[in-house]
Image (cartoon, rainbow, N blue to C red):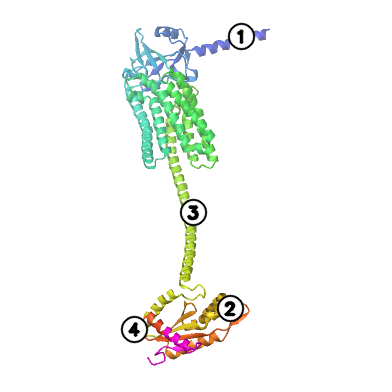
């Protein structure tokens, strides 16, 4: 029994000590001679006012009674809270010559901030700030709520701060001498200037690309940069300071509206850049659903209470970014190379967004990386996305060049094939035309030249012979008693005799360069170049002997033939025309027939000297 009593007593003692330690008020923030700035979180205690109706006097009394609790884990981020939260602390200016200090609450999105200072003589001063008041209500023109505080030497001043906000509650209080604050602000403004300078440069660069290329991805990238820059401008308090300092309503309204615009542009840019409609149609529909959600949230911000809109949008940012990472990984798996740079860019934004959201919900303490992580991550993301756009454009240009090259090669092959087909067709047409020309100048039965073509060629030969002082021999050949052949053996037999005579003349006279033609009916004409009279008569006699020397065999019959030949020698310079030459050869032919046929008759002057 004594053991149980001892354990109970020990437990009670531990509870007493732990309770006294938890409720113990922090000591005062001592400002000695070497200190120019001080973060006040370690010296503050807090108490929640759920309905937000308590006044300063009641809270000073609660602090005097030790009812305020130390900050949980020393953190100044409390997430979304109800009502108002009071913070109590004490400031002791030990021996610092500086008595005028600037108290700054380093979080711009607080609706109402009330500062109460109670001096040892019982005097209480009250000052108010926050984005429900015009920007001019602040002690100095600065994006974070701030107050001038008088701290006499070796005097302890009691500090009471009431904060109420519909957004995330963050109360990183710090106190500065004017010189220390000026140095802090210089560094801070430099970092902000670099961030927005990067955004403006990227926006301008991609505006030029969009105007020149008309690529939708560059347009939505600009919307993404603009929307994200507007969000950061609002979250940093710069929009309230520079855009609408006299409109607290817009200072609050711009935050959910800019968040909606930023997220819409971000997911739309993702859809276009990753080509979701073609590559991932199901995922594209989900992205469209996310866009519709943020459109509705943006519209609802005009009618619904601030926290009701901001909280779900803030909660949706992180899973939305994770979903985009998932889409990028899917795109990489399907072989879309630009998604690799896209994924790296989104990794930076995701990390920065996670840090910022974690602070908003009180999961991480407020420090440089958590406070400015979203600016750092987003700047890296914007830069890498710009590289990704350039890489995507280069890939698309390469792909287009490949397609154009393949198309040109295909077109060249098609043109070559069509050209070959056309050449073949032209060759066939030329052959057909040649055959047609040949058929127009050839006798259909014997294959020799017809009378019309013979005259054209004969005129050309006559002109050529005249120029070169050469003689032309003309033979006019007629089958004897050809009518009897037709009457006895039939016209088909007569046709065969004509064909046989054409072959006979060709075979025997072609070696002499003869021009052969069927002159009409059973008459044939021969022109022999560079002839003299004796040779002409020899060729004529040889031809006659060849015709009568062998019968024509047709249908089992041997049909004997003979021919009468008239010869004429056309000498150069005689001034004889084609018709005259043919007429004189024809006269010689009739003379041969009158002699009894089957003989050669020379026209006058054939054998005489030239």
Marks 1 and 4, Cα distance to the nearest angstrom? 160 Å
Mark 3 → mark 2, Cα distance in angstroms: 66 Å
Q: CA distance from mark 1 to mark 3?
A: 96 Å
Mark 3 crowdedness (10 Å alpha carbons): few <14, some 14-19, many ≥20:
few
Mark 4 vs mark 2, CA separation in Å: 45 Å
Residue 575's disc is: 4
| Residue 489: numbered disc | 2
Is disc 4 placed on a helix, strand or loop? Answer: loop
Corner quadrant of residue 89 = top left
Nearest the viewer among 150 and 420 is: 420
Q: Is residue 444 visible?
A: yes
Q: Nearer the viewer, residue 180 or 559?
A: 559
Magenta span includes 607 = yes
Upstream in sequence: badge 3 or badge 2: 3
Q: Magenta includes 293?
A: no
Query: Where does label 3 land, which residue?
Result: 410
Q: Are marks 1 and 3 in contact (CB under 8 Å)?
A: no
Tell me which segment is drawn in magenta. 586-610
Where's residue 116, x and y in %?
37, 12
């Amino acid at each position: 029994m004594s053991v149980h009593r001892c354990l109970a007593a020990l437990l009670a003692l531990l509870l007493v000590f732990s309770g006294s330690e938890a409720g113990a008020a922090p000591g005062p923030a001592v400002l000695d001679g070497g200190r120019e700035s001080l973060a006040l979180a370690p010296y503050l205690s807090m108490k929640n006012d759920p309905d937000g109706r308590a006044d300063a006097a009641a809270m000073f009394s609660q602090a005097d009674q030790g009812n305020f609790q130390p900050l949980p884990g020393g953190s100044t981020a409390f997430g979304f809270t109800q009502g108002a939260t009071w913070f109590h602390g004490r400031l002791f200016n030990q021996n610092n010559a500086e008595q005028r200090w600037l108290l700054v609450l380093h979080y711009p999105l607080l609706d109402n901030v009330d500062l109460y200072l109670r001096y040892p003589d019982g005097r209480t001063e009250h000052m108010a700030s926050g984005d429900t008041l015009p920007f001019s209500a602040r002690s100095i023109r600065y994006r974070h709520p701030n107050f001038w505080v008088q701290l006499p030497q070796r005097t302890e001043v009691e500090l009471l701060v009431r904060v109420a906000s519909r957004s995330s509650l963050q109360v990183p209080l710090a106190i500065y001498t004017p010189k220390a604050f000026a140095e802090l602000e210089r560094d801070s403004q430099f970092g902000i200037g670099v961030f927005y300078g990067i955004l403006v440069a990227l926006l301008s660069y991609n505006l030029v690309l969009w105007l020149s290329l008309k690529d939708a991805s560059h347009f939505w990238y600009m919307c993404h940069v603009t929307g994200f820059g507007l969000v950061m401008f609002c979250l940093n308090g710069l929009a309230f300071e520079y855009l609408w300092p006299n409109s607290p309503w817009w200072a609050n309204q711009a935050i959910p509206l800019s968040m909606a615009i930023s997220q819409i542009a971000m997911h739309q840019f993702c859809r276009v850049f990753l080509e979701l409609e073609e590559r991932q149609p199901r995922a594209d529909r989900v992205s469209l659903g996310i866009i519709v959600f943020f459109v509705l949230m943006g519209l609802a911000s005009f009618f619904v209470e601030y926290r009701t809109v901001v909280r779900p949008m803030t909660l949706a940012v992180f899973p939305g970014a994770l979903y985009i990472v998932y889409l990028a990984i899917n795109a990489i798996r399907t072989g879309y190379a630009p998604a690799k740079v896209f994924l790296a860019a989104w990794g930076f934004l995701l990390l920065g967004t996670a840090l910022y959201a974690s602070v908003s919900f009180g999961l991480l303490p407020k420090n440089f990386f958590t406070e400015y992580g979203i600016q750092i991550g987003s700047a890296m993301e914007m830069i890498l996305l710009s590289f990704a756009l350039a890489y995507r454009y280069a890939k698309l240009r390469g792909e287009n060049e490949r397609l154009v090259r393949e198309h040109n090669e295909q077109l060249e092959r098609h043109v070559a094939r069509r050209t070959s087909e056309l050449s073949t067709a032209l060759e066939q047409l030329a052959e057909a035309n040649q055959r047609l020309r040949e058929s127009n100048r050839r006798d259909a039965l014997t294959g020799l030249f017809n009378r019309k073509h013979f005259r054209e060629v004969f005129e050309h030969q006559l002109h050529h012979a005249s120029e070169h002082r050469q003689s032309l021999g003309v033979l006019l050949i007629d089958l004897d008693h050809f009518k009897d052949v037709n009457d006895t053996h039939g016209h088909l037999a007569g046709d065969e005799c004509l064909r046989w005579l054409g072959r006979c003349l060709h075979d025997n006279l072609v070696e002499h360069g003869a021009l052969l033609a069927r002159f009409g009916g059973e008459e044939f004409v021969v022109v022999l170049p560079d002839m003299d009279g004796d040779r002409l008569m020899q060729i004529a006699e040889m031809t006659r002997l060849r015709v009568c020397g062998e019968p024509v065999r047709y249908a089992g019959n041997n049909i004997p033939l003979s021919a009468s030949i008239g010869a004429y020698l056309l000498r150069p310079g005689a001034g004889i025309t084609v018709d005259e030459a043919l007429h004189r050869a024809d006269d010689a032919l009739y003379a041969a027939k009158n002699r009894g046929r089957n003989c050669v008759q020379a026209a006058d002057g054939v054998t005489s000297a030239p």
